[in-house]
Amino acid sequence: MRKFLVLLAASLFAHTAADSQATAKNKPNIILFLVDDMGWEDARKYHTPNIDKLAAGGKVFTNAYANNVCTPTRVSLVTGFNAAHHHITNWTHPEKDHSADAPDDQFLPTEWNYNGLSPQPGIPHTFYARPLPAILKDAGYFTVHVGKAHWAAQGTPGVSPYNLGFIVNISGHAAGHPQSYLSEENYGNLPGKNSAQSVPDLEEYYQSGTFLTEALTKEALKAIELPVKNKQPFFLNLAHYAVHVPLMADKRFFQAYLDKGLDSAEAQYASLVEGVDASLGEVMQFLEDRNIDKNTVVIFLSDNGGLSNSPPRGGESFTHNLPLRAGKGSLYEGGIRVPLVVRYPPLVKANSTTAQPVIAEDFFPTVLDLAGITPAAAGTPIDGRSFYNRLKDQGSMDTGRAFIWHYPNKWKAGDGPAINYYSAIRKGDWKLVYSLRTRQSELYNLQADLGEWHDLAKQYPAKVKELEKALGQILKSYDAPMPVERSTGIKLPYPGTN
Amino acid sequence: MRKFLVLLAASLFAHTAADSQATAKNKPNIILFLVDDMGWEDARKYHTPNIDKLAAGGKVFTNAYANNVCTPTRVSLVTGFNAAHHHITNWTHPEKDHSADAPDDQFLPTEWNYNGLSPQPGIPHTFYARPLPAILKDAGYFTVHVGKAHWAAQGTPGVSPYNLGFIVNISGHAAGHPQSYLSEENYGNLPGKNSAQSVPDLEEYYQSGTFLTEALTKEALKAIELPVKNKQPFFLNLAHYAVHVPLMADKRFFQAYLDKGLDSAEAQYASLVEGVDASLGEVMQFLEDRNIDKNTVVIFLSDNGGLSNSPPRGGESFTHNLPLRAGKGSLYEGGIRVPLVVRYPPLVKANSTTAQPVIAEDFFPTVLDLAGITPAAAGTPIDGRSFYNRLKDQGSMDTGRAFIWHYPNKWKAGDGPAINYYSAIRKGDWKLVYSLRTRQSELYNLQADLGEWHDLAKQYPAKVKELEKALGQILKSYDAPMPVERSTGIKLPYPGTN
């Protein structure tokens, strides 16, 4: 059934190919400015004048969600499917057929789509979809990917952004982080020192003193010169490697944070954040210089919550995203709630805010709406919902929707706060966090307790039951992967079904 | 003065930017199918049905010339300048500010543009030009580079094909050869085993059994799908790494050559040649399948003469290009005469041949003529001459032109036949080979003695004097780099000037 729906979706999109480049002329440019591992509050904590300016010119989503790790989010963004549905629930290992899951005493390795996204059917352990850039390209967009890709493993078609519909790809490949941010280290390409994380395509900047974030920005702006000149709409997926580990000092900003008293690791982290902010500033300046800032949608987003393990962060683990609890890897808010700003003057009111919850898979239909591509607007069997009307402040908030997260995987050798083998559901202000290990739920009211410190499960057993059931039903409808007990060889039942 | 001329050329080309994509619709597609180190007679010696078919459908140039090593040719192809004029007389080292010249007892290191081609002025030791792909892009072409670039060194703008005007670049960078042709070795990207020669951008094929030649062909055909669909003319620079060392077996063809009795190294070489032939076949099939074979100019060319050093070749050194003398690195015909076939049905008579000598820098104005870009046709201060009329068999042969080669460099530790520190000039059937070491000339009549075995210098002293003078005058007008005597610190005078 799921396969049928996917094929149906593909055929619904097929006629968008009829959109010619000519009819695309009046479509807006779209920039997805995607940061890696940036925390929800980072823009408030560090010097980020350009993010602030973007927020002043657009709308801040205070309840925006991604997944707890990166590949699931990246796949959801370009497919409209929830991670539990596309079954890429963890980050993909660079090598084919290698699950990134750490070994576990309780569970056998979970079967998930560890080879990632595939634009071709029939590749084992991949999720097949016709991704957003391919649809946009067929609709006349000039599609550019710059930076971290991490959609799929080496030896599969999805590893190449070209196969996903990008006309230009610079530096996107199988890796989820850079070996080095430094031109002095050739971004990880020093002879005999390479790894799967060596950043490709930047030889121009070797030994030049150009920090990776800066080099990617330059490449992105060069790549969109052509569509800007030709008045062809472009889709730029500027996916920075920053602020992912390895934490390294962006020298343009590092010293100022040391001077403020941050320890070395935190000053490095802060310098990475400010480097991303500077990149955003350069992008916005480019748009203004070419007088296309009004006709360009700029979406600023992080792919998961901020990293909060120490080390490599300074200070104490799981405190870096306060007032949110925990960080990357966790299903607490610190791991999944992300900064989101959308600027698009013709549609989006400047200096506005919305509490409407949105999630990674919502970007797919929203971007199609922004691009005026009708099948998504008409409704397709994806999981995401367009927040186009929210951008326009039109209609009412969507308060009844259930949001789910599913991580039947092991991120770290040791468990942490809602890290390793968790599922979660949010509906309205209620959030249930379900441990797959213990099959026990925690219940929080986010309105009253954003930090998820007061477990109300015992107080509200009916709410727990209701949310467990809803979570289980959605997971079942997605045929979501589940852990298998090592001792019995039996796959866990879905929550609320026993 | 030279700088002025370059700027003049740039301004003459500037108005071609006015050609819009729309007016470009009727321009032919252009494919430069560039092989590396393929010898003049290789297509006759090995099984190359697709090259044969191309020849049967187009015109064979029996007197086509490149330079004796690769970068000079690659720069001449996209700039229209002779190597002695652009001063990139040798292959460029991957690292910036490293001359590739071997040390020498007689001469100090020659000052040449060892950082390669630059699309920006002011980069030390580069030749600044507005290259062919940039001009074609501005004229509405969709420009694609796939394979070996080798136009410039890391840390300079010319190292990135994007900066040279290519919209798409796959696998082109600073290196002049691949670390490995094998997907089993990740084309040189196995962790901890990388070098400047690790081939980028092909992670999709890792461990897939896809030989490099095949992977590049697939990438090239995927990249031109978009312009074909949009009916936008494309320029594809499909620059194979084959048949350059490291000699490796293309398993699709290797065994058959062993069975024919070739030794292992020669069977590897032959398999590389046949792999290139298969690639050409796939390209032509693609064009036919999409019914664009008639509107596509296909230029088949090698960047210098065939390698004839043994090892790595089997058999005896300097015999592999017989009846031509010597091979890559040499200014004898074996090092500079290359296979050239042009197929373009609307213009070029099938199964035709021409003895008109042409040289690398002639491709620049010829391609501009084919693309209907006028400044070149009207004449610009480049060195190359368009052979557009020759393609049409129109007008008379150009017999009076002097062709020169200049290699004030050291390719190998030991000298060889016309290898290291040589210049040469051909005018009509006469060819003078001038040793910069001894300042002595050899004289050959190519009509009577294609193999350059009978030095006629003593018999025709007046012809020697005439050609030395002509060679010296051209070199002087190009301000060509010259070796400096280590013992005196004095730069050699140009030939015929003392």
Image (spheres, coloured by chain):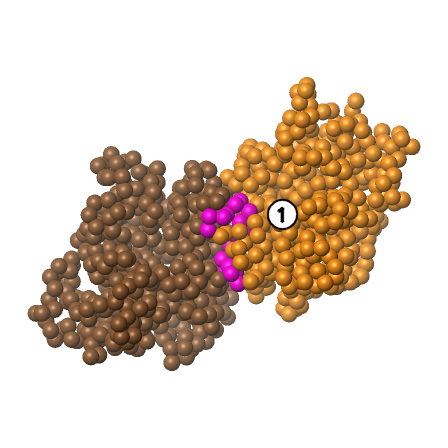
Chain colours: A orange, B brown
Q: Is residue A318 above or below residue B139?
A: above
Is residue A198 in the magenta section? yes
Q: Decide which of B299, A177 is in the foreground and name it.
A: A177
Q: Is residue B1 left or right of residue A212?
A: left
Q: Decide which of A342, A387 is in the foreground and name it.
A: A342
Q: Decide which of B230, A88 is in the foreground and name it.
A: A88
What chain letter is assigned to the residue under label 1?
A: A
Residue B362 at x, y percent in the picture: 32, 66
Residue named by callout 1: A132
Q: Is residue A49 left or right of residue B158?
A: right
Residue B384 can be seen in this image: no
Tell me which residue sits at (46%, 60%) in the image: B154
User: For the image shown, how many numbered marks are present on the structure?
Assistant: 1
Q: Quadrant of residue A176?
A: top right
Q: Is residue A156 left or right of residue B31?
A: right
The C terminus of chain A - image quarter: top right
Tell me which residue sits at (31%, 38%) in the image: B254
Residue A130 can be seen in this image: yes
Q: Decide which of B437, A202 is in the foreground and name it.
A: B437
Tell me which residue sits at (38%, 71%) in the image: B376
Residue that protrudes farthest toward the right in the picture: A459
What range of the chain is rendered magenta? A191-208
Residue B430 at x, y percent in the picture: 16, 67
| Amino acid type at image mark 1 | Leu
What secondary structure predominates along the stretch shown in magenta?
loop
Dot 1: few (<14), some (14–19), or many (≥20) neighbours within 10 Å? many
Q: Quadrant of residue B371?
A: bottom left
